[in-house]
Amino acid sequence: MNIMCIGDSITAGYGLSSNENWVYLMNKSLDHSFINKGINGDTSTGLLMRFKKDVIDFKSDMCFIMIGINDLMLNTEPEIVIKNIGIIIKDAVNFNITPIIISQPPINRDMAITLWDEYLNYDRILLKQTHLNNLFKDFCSSKDILFIDVFSYFKSICNSENYHSDGIHLNSFGNLALTKFISQEIQSLF
């Protein structure tokens, strides 16, 4: 089974060696082919533009979609992200590709101010990220699509700053935790 993992730098594994990102770790832990199509800085609009080339033309069986934080940092409203995801989901279903939506881990405000960009309004971004996560839940429920709530999972972990490299991206421990959580959530599919 070919499983395309499409998204931004969190999928790509920003700041990590290639054998530390969650897509690589999924390949090692499950007997399926997980292909990393994460692009640093990508947005839901960018994903929409490359979905045919990166997923449909590849004849994927399944597609994990993890996107949104760059949209929010660029001040795109969560409803626009959902609209773009809706088009992507429709295309996936039309080509018999099983879509799975994975929310992104919450930003760590204090780390991001220090290690990423001190001028972004991270409180506003985190509010929008919470809203986007709720929209993802509602959207996936209404479309009967599997939703993997990474956002809530990482919010529930004590000392979640131990899993971030810069407040936005996950470090190697964060990617291990992400891999374990996703693996548990998809066990029933295989």
Image: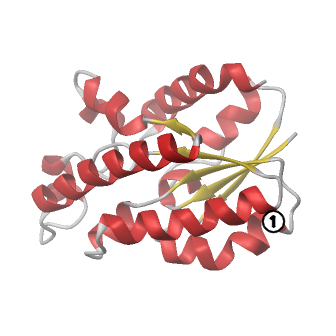
Residue 81 as seen in the image, left or right of residue 11: left
Q: Give the crowd class for mark 1: few <14, some 14-19, many >=20 residues within 10 Å.
A: some
Q: Amino acid at mark 1?
A: Ile
Q: Which residue is mark 1?
A: 56
Picture residue at 60% right of the left edge, 74% below the top:
48
Q: Position of residue 13 (x, y in %)?
A: 54, 51
Q: Nearer the viewer, residue 176 or 134?
A: 134
Please tell me whether residue 138 is drawn above or below residue 56 in the rendered image.
Answer: above
Picture residue at 53% right of the left edge, 63% below the top:
85
Q: Quadrant of the C terminus?
A: top right
Please tell me whether residue 122 is drawn above or below residue 43 in the rendered image.
Answer: above
Residue 45 as seen in the image, left or right of residue 35: left
Q: Nearer the viewer, residue 164 or 121?
A: 121
Q: Quadrant of the N terminus?
A: top right
**Visible in this render: residue 33?**
yes
Q: Position of residue 36 (x, y in %)?
A: 69, 53
**Protein image colouring:** secondary structure
Picture residue at 22% right of the left edge, 25% below the top:
159
Q: Position of residue 7 (x, y in %)?
A: 56, 59
Query: Of helix, strand and loop, which one carries label 1?
Result: helix
In the rendered image, which quarter is residue 116 located in?
Answer: bottom left
Q: Nearer the viewer, residue 13 or 44?
A: 44
Picture residue at 71% right of the left edge, 66% below the top:
91
Q: Position of residue 129 (x, y in %)?
A: 27, 53
Please tell me whether residue 63 is drawn above or below residue 176 in the rendered image.
Answer: below
